[in-house]
Image (tube, helix red, strand yellow):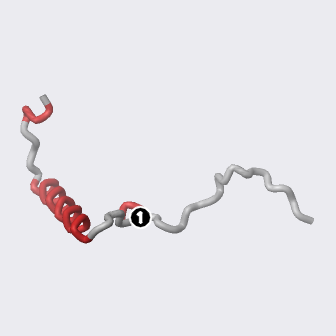
């Protein structure tokens, strides 16, 4: 005999696709891909350099 489900608000459903959604590319052209890759590389290099922002940047 089938039992009535206790909960229908989808709490137990787990997304198994696109677990790394940040890796999904959304650019529409190759130029946008290259630009975004360059920006990511520059940000990674800045973070790795351990440089600080100028004190007056956020004034």
Q: Position of residue 12 (x, y in %)?
A: 65, 56
Q: Determine the residue located farthest toward the bottom in the rendered image.
A: 30
Judge left or right: residue 3 versus residue 10. Answer: right
Identify the element where label 1 is drawn: loop
Q: In this picture, is 56 found above or below 15?
A: above
Front position in the image: 12 or 17: 17
Judge left or right: residue 52 versus residue 15. Answer: left
Quadrant including the C terminus: top left
Which residue corresponds to mark 1? 20
Judge left or right: residue 4 versus residue 23. Answer: right
Q: Determine the residue located farthest toward the right in the rendered image.
A: 1
Quadrant including the N terminus: bottom right
Front position in the image: 59 or 35: 35
- Seen at 87% across and 59% down, the residue is 3
Query: Residue 26's image quarter?
Result: bottom left
Q: Determine the residue located farthest toward the top in the rendered image.
A: 59
Q: Position of residue 38 (x, y in %)?
A: 17, 64
Front position in the image: 48 or 54: 54
């Amino acid at each position: 005999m089938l039992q009535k489900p206790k909960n229908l608000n989808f709490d137990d459903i787990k997304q198994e696709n696109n677990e790394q959604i940040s890796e999904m590319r959304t650019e529409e052209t190759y130029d946008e891909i290259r630009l975004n890759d360059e920006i990511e590389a520059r940000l990674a290099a800045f973070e790795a350099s351990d440089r600080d922002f100028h004190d007056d940047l956020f004034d």
